[in-house]
Image (spheres, helix red, strand yellow):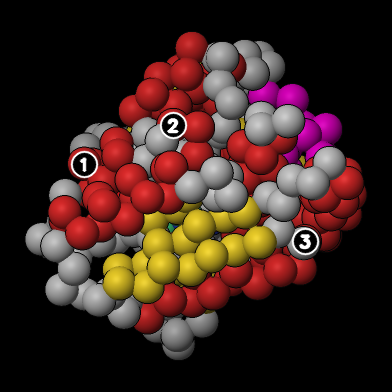
Amino acid sequence: MTLIDGKMVASELRKEIRAEVAALNRENIRPCLAVVLVGDNPASRVYVSNKEKDCAECGLVSKEHKLSAETGEQELLALIAALNADESVHGIIVQLPLPKQIDEQRVIAAISPDKDVDCFHPYNVGCMMQGNDRFLPCTPAGVMALLDYYHIDPAGKHCVVLGRSNIVGKPQAMLLLRRNGTVTICHSKTPDLAAECRKADILVSAVGKVNLVTADMVKQGAVVIDVAMNRNEAGKLCGDVAFDAVAPQCSYITPVPGGVGPMTRLMLLRNTLTAAARKK
Ligand code: NAP
């Protein structure tokens, strides 16, 4: 069994990002990510500060816009319009979830598709479906980068994705399909999850339930990618997969933490550089 080391792969790829930032700087382009945080959700605050730290480490500029939890939708839309028009800003992310008075889909659709570095805008989602994308959604793209790094080719493999969210499950399935995997998507209404999982050569779990994937659900030699980030009863960070029991029968497996998470963060920087490079 090989442990897929997302931290190591991300740190390798970070060197490439730094070199690309330096090359853009030489052309007087300062790649810049605007990060919008509405309210004071503690998890969101951590995600936002990590994104800013990542930018600083790789030489990108980050501009934080903190708005109060009472912010109205019009005020947020006005900020997005200003960021869309600001030539010094290349990427915009609005940290989700948003307070309930704000319609998330309306906000996502207001971000210029050219600056939509989360790749949530319907236009960019459509481009990804058609295979003529400029951005890819960060978490699924991070999973694909891990597979590539370890020379795991989805072509001809049976890939099973657990979860069908717009952010992870659906785009993950699409990216595996684009790479010629035969893809099954499972969700909460799938009647026999274990039977579906046992067919997987590559199993990607993005549900958010501790110990959902147990050893009897995983085929000998399967590749297991655990996207989830949960807390177990002891408060320890863990994924969906019962790691200790499942790992011995896998060919490759990601740990949580240290698997997909670091790659997601890196892919946001990659998308921001893609947006900045379009300005050349
Ligand atoms: P989400 O929007 O809550 O979606 C969860 C999906 O799991 C839904 O499609 C749901 O099905 C499905 N599901 C729920 N119970 C199930 C069950 N018993 N069997 C099979 N499927 C079931 O979550 P998300 O945003 O996609 O995130 C999923 C997990 O990934 C979370 O733990 C999140 O923290 C983590 N995550 C990690 C990263 C990272 O960088 N590592 C990034 C994003 C998310 P229905 O559609 O039928 O409800």
Percent x, y for residue 135? 57, 32
- Tag 1 residue: 106
SS type, badge 3? helix
Task: Report the span colored magenta.
Answer: 145-154
Which residue is pictured at 66% across the width and 40% down the height?
A: 276
Please, what is the three-letter code of the amino acid marked with disc 1? Arg
In the picture shown, does residue 129 fall above or below 108? above
SS type, badge 1? helix
In the image, is 189 to the left or to the right of 117? left
- Residue 113 badge: 2
Mark 2 vs 1: CB contact within 8 A = no
Q: Quadrant of the C terminus?
A: top right
In the image, is 174 to the left or to the right of 274? left
Q: Is residue 19 magenta?
A: no
Determine the CA span between mark 2 and mark 3.
Answer: 24 Å
Please, what is the three-letter code of the amino acid marked with disc 2? Pro
Give the farthest residue toward the bottom: 234
